[in-house]
């Protein structure tokens, strides 16, 4: 196992709870060690870390590095995400759902007792629409072959092998926003 190896680094990042899909584009260099030139302390020979534009100088506890990494990843995701606005008049009532076509995607927005969940409308099994599925609590059952998916995680019940994409839903007054990460927004417009 080589520490500079891309797959090793992605494996370590996943073990620490990061999404390798979000980080893979950061590992496109040729493995040449970083020699700082423009980031102040990074050029001075002390251990130095540049995370999301912030410099942490000197040796840092693992917990602090991890927290800073999480902040940088979250900030990058926030600034690069696409937000699909759902006007107040379209926000579903408790127990209801609506189909939303936007940004080249078909999404289903559910209201489960005041908690909102947004997922892709395509079942990850064979692509059937999930919008008309049977909703039981926070579980949606596909009409086609009966597979059931947890709306919080997107995973098929009892499995982590099959998953429907689910998206954060933010509230701004009466309006909602469905947050589409950059990689998903890019792939749906290709
Ligand atoms: S297409 Fe949904 S369970 Fe088969």
Image (cartoon, grey):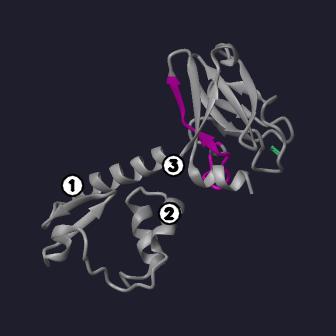
Distance from Cα at disc 3 to Cα at disc 1? 24 Å
Q: Which mark is residue 20?
A: 2
Instruction: Assess disc 3: are there few (<14), some (14-19) or many (≥20) residues with their C-alpha within 10 Å of its C-alpha.
Output: few
Residue 108 percent coordinates (x, y): 72, 32
| 60 is within the stretch colored magenta | no
For marks 3 and 1, the one nearer the N-term is 1
- Mark 2 or 3: in front is 3
Above or below: residue 116 compared with residue 55: above
Q: Is mark 2 within 8 Å of ligand 1?
A: no
Relative to 182, is 3 on the left or the right?
Answer: left
**SS for callout 1:** helix
For marks 2 and 1, the one nearer the N-term is 2
Residue 79 percent coordinates (x, y): 47, 46
Give the residue pinned by disc 3.
Answer: 80
**SS for callout 3:** helix
Give the residue pinned by disc 1.
Answer: 64
Relative to 15, is 158 on the left or the right?
Answer: right
| 163 is within the stretch colored magenta | yes
Number of disc labels: 3
Residue 51 percent coordinates (x, y): 31, 60
Q: Residue at x 58, y 29 (%)?
A: 177
Q: Quadrant of residue 48?
A: bottom left
Q: Is mark 1 within 8 Å of ligand 1?
A: no
């Amino acid at each position: 196992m080589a520490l500079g190896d891309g797959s090793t680094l992605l494996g370590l990042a996943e073990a620490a709870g990061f999404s390798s899909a979000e980080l893979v584009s950061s590992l496109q260099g040729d493995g040449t060690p970083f020699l700082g030139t423009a980031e102040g302390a990074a050029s001075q020979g002390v251990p130095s870390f540049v995370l999301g534009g912030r410099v942490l100088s000197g040796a840092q506890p693992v917990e602090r590095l991890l927290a800073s990494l999480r902040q940088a990843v979250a900030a990058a995701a926030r600034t690069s995400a696409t937000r699909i606005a759902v006007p107040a008049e379209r926000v579903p009532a408790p127990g209801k759902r609506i189909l939303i076509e936007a940004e080249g995607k078909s999404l289903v927005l559910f209201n489960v007792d005041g908690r909102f969940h947004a997922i892709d409308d395509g079942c990850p099994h064979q692509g059937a629409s999930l919008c008309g599925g049977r909703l039981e609590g926070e579980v949606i059952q596909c009409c086609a072959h009966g597979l059931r998916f947890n709306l919080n995680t997107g995973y098929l019940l009892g499995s982590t092998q099959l998953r429907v994409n689910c998206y954060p839903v933010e509230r701004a007054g009466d309006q909602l926003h469905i947050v589409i990460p950059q990689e998903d927004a890019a792939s749906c417009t290709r």
